[in-house]
């Protein structure tokens, strides 16, 4: 029999697929058994750390986080550091990673526009090379991989609300394209690995998500407005203020991601809350709920800002039985407590 070579072709030059390596015999020992070993890239970030909390609640899971701490922090994971079922690796996904895992939640990528535009070449490398590396890992160990793609793949959408069938309206050379085109290529890579190598893939198209643990100076609109309201500063609405977004609370998002990973559908599936608000409406809600004394000020916007965005979540409802439960006004209040604690600004007692 021709001996297989490691580059995926045998000595006759015929194309072969390398089988996954045999796991250690201990992997199946009943004294060593964790049902699933799960890698979360970007697990020290906002959504990633909430996902890790939820995964760690299941005592049969071992969780490994790989993160370069660009926008994430060990602080977000402090309750798990030292836990026997948890490992934290400082690792940049643009480099290959060798671990033995059953599932990969691939989140690593800066998400706030101010961070992803800070070093655009690094952002596109993270999306393209990072996803390629994680797909290579999935292929080597036979793991299922979920990519957190984004509503930004729809660009400045000409269809509203956006279904998964819409191909988008993206500026390929704009300042946002390191992120939105990067995620589009990442989706392409996922499907090519799926078709060519049979990798089990899942793709979530996440719409704006908010909640506790967002970076205080993250630059995204909900965290900006809440930090400004708590500090008693004006709320900075970028012009024209009539642009819309749909905001999903992080606990709902995490439930959707886990359902997608463990379901049968590859996606892409929109995950988001269809409640749609203009930025002026969001500012009014934050003002009313958190600090009625603050003013609202209009500031300059950035290029290619999408004018409207709202997910059609029919597919998520039908395929995953998922829909968000937490409405914006409840979620904002849940977030306020966390921001007050970190900014050390206690709530004033009502007279
Ligand atoms: N929050 C949202 O509204 C939203 C919307 C759509 C998509 N997403 C996607 O969800 C994922 C998580 O977003 P988030 O809001 O938690 O952002 P975040 O910035 O809080 O988290 C991203 C994490 O990835 C890490 N990271 C970045 N580049 C890396 C690299 N090269 N190697 C290793 N780690 C790296 C960061 O340090 C951070 O911990 C991202 O992929 C983002 O594109 C988020
Ligand atoms: O202080 C601010 C910040 C932002 N904005 C506005 O708020 C809207 C939302 O901006 P954000 O920066 O929060 O987020 P965006 O919707 O532009 O991108 C987001 O959506 C999809 C995800 O993939 C990205 O990770 C996420 O950041 C924009 O119209 C922006 O102009 C303000 O009005 N004031």
Image (cartoon, grey):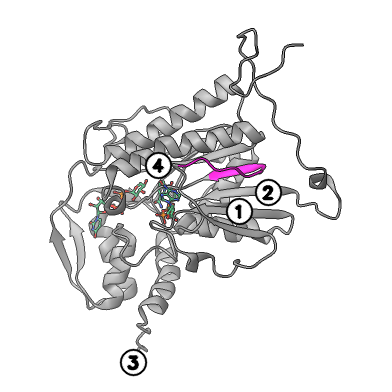
Inspect the magenta stretch and tell me whether residue 103 lies in it.
Answer: yes
Name the secondary structure under disc 4. Answer: helix
Q: Which residues are magenta?
A: 95-105
**Residue 291 x/y as whole percent:** 29, 76
Residue of label 1: 64
Separation (CA) of disc 1 from disc 4: 19 Å
* Disc with the residue nearer the chain's start (2 vs 1): 2
Name the secondary structure under disc 1. Answer: strand
**Residue 235 x/y as whole percent:** 22, 67
Q: Is mark 3 within 8 Å of ligand 2?
A: no
Residue at the spot 62% in from the left edge and 9% down from the top edge:
14
Separation (CA) of disc 1 from disc 3: 48 Å
Q: Mark number for residue 37?
A: 2
**Residue 180 x/y as whole percent:** 33, 38
* Disc with the residue nearer the chain's start (1 vs 4): 1
Q: Residue furthest bottom?
A: 351
Residue of label 4: 126
């Amino acid at each position: 029999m021709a001996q297989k070579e490691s580059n995926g072709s045998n000595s006759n030059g015929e194309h072969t697929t390398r089988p996954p390596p045999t796991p250690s015999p201990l992997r199946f020992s009943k004294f060593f058994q964790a049902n699933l070993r799960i890698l979360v890239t970007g697990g020290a970030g906002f959504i990633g750390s909430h996902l890790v909390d939820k995964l760690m609640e299941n005592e049969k899971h071992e969780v490994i986080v790989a993160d370069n701490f660009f926008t994430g922090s060990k602080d977000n994971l402090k309750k798990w550091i030292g836990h026997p079922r948890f490992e934290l690796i400082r690792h940049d996904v643009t480099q290959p990673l060798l671990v033995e895992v059953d599932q990969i939640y691939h989140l690593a990528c800066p998400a706030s526009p101010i961070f992803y535009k800070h070093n655009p070449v690094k952002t596109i490398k993270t999306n393209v090379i990072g996803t390629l590396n994680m797909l290579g890992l999935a292929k080597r160990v036979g793991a299922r991989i979920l990519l957190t793609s984004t509503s930004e793949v729809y660009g400045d959408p000409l269809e509203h609300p956006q279904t998964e069938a819409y191909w988008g309206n993206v500026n390929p050379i704009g300042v946002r394209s390191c992120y939105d085109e990067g995620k589009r290529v990442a989706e392409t890579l996922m499907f090519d690995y799926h078709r060519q190598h049979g990798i089990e893939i899942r793709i979530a198209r996440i719409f704006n998500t908010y909640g506790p643990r967002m970076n205080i100076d993250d630059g995204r609109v909900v965290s900006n407005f809440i930090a400004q309201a708590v500090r008693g500063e004006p709320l900075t609405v970028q012009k024209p203020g009539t642009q819309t977004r749909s905001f999903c609370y992080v606990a709902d998002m995490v439930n959707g991601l886990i359902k997608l990973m463990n379901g049968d559908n590859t996606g892409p599936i929109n995950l988001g809350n269809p409640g749609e608000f203009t930025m002026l409406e969001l500012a009014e809600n934050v003002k009313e709920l958190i600090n009625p004394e603050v003013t609202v000020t209009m500031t300059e916007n950035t290029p290619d800002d999408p004018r409207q965005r709202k997910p059609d979540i029919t597919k998520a409802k039908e395929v995953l039985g998922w829909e968000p439960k937490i409405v914006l006004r409840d979620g904002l209040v849940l977030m306020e407590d966390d921001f007050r604690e970190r900014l050390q600004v206690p709530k004033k007692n009502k007279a």
